[in-house]
Amino acid sequence: MQKLPALIFLAGLLAAGCRTQSTLPSAALPTPAPALLARQNVDATIYQHMSAEAYRLYQQGYELAKVRLDANLARPHALPPAVIVDVDETVLDNSPYQVTNAAMGRSFSPDTWKAWTTKGIAKALPGAVEFLNYAASKGCDVFYITNREPDEKAATISNLHNEGFPMADSVHVVPMEGTSDKTARRAAVARTHYIALLAGDQLTDFDESLKNRSVDNGKPLVRAQRDTLERYFIMLPNPMYGVWLDAISGKPLADKPANKEAALRKYAY
Ligand SMILES: [Mg+2]
């Protein structure tokens, strides 16, 4: 009986020791930026991967694409018509890669990205295959202008082909050529074709000038080009990453989580 208080005291010490060992390191060390970024991206990734709302937005975008394409093909044009689409989050769905990142607490890296694209298993986004085959049936050449790297080209062609996209070949799939700016690649198509429609998940899939977010996050530039955007560009949803987010989160990975938090505070009322 006399030993009981001592045992309880000892048990208390051991428990305190266990708590100290199990909680102190994680509490004392800062969470790495990739893990913070992964956490910040969870809702966006769930929206893109799982929501019927995103699913419907893609359908809706490609329904409108058909209407716009018909109208633009009815306009006078001398050259054969073409449709230009981006690849990622425009015709192929990479949300499984983003889901994996979020679940593993990691952020984008070229190595994990290429491990994903090399598999060539991304699914077509809703409405994309149907629309592009419609465009092909109307005599359009379809160009896939993407900022994937040249060493991802073969797997991308195979992926697009397997999903049923038309003209998935080395001529029509145009990867990045040293710059993410797609202006020169679009101009090359324009030399031989009448570009009847473009579609993308970034405004820069239409015009590089729309990369500028220095005034009101770029919205005045969108207003200035509204007529041409309405006629020639289909904007598709991607809340997971993009020019809009880069403009806020900045370049150094370590600063991105704090920059995003600071942006939220800036706009809070
Ligand atoms: Mg894209």
Image (spheres, rainbow, N blue to C red):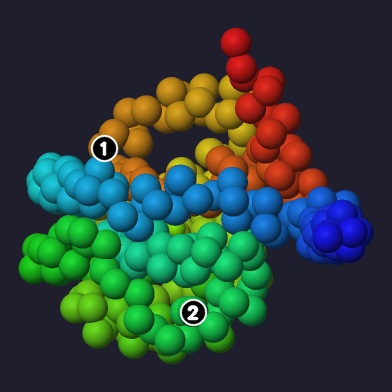
Calculate the distance from the C-alpha at mark 1 to the C-alpha at mark 2: 34 Å
Determine which quarter of the picture holds residue 231: top left
Q: Amino acid at mark 1?
A: Arg
Mark 2 residue crowding within 10 angstroms, few (<14) / some (14–19) / many (20+): some
Viewer-closest of 158 and 111: 111
The reply, left or right, for residue 34 in relation to residue 183 is right
Viewer-closest of 12 and 24: 12
Q: Which residue in the structure is indicated by mark 1?
A: 231
Residue drawn at x 45%, y 47% is 44
Residue 159 x/y as whole percent: 33, 82
Residue 8 x/y as whole percent: 83, 57
For the C terminus, the image quarter is top right
Viewer-closest of 18 and 97: 18
For the N terminus, the image quarter is bottom right
Secondary element type, mark 2: helix
Determine which quarter of the picture holds residue 20: bottom right
The reply, left or right, for residue 252 in relation to residue 171 is right
Q: Relative to 1, does residue 153 appear above or below in the rendering?
A: below
Residue 160 x/y as whole percent: 30, 78
Q: Which residue in the structure is indicated by mark 2?
A: 116
Residue drawn at x 26%, y 83% is 161
Question: Is ligand 1 closer than 8 angstroms to the Cβ of mark 2?
Answer: no
- Does the CB distance between marks 1 and 2 fall below 8 Å? no
Residue drawn at x 45%, y 24% is 224
Q: Amino acid at mark 2?
A: Trp
The reply, left or right, for residue 237 in relation to residue 183 is left
Ligand 1 falls in quadrant: bottom left
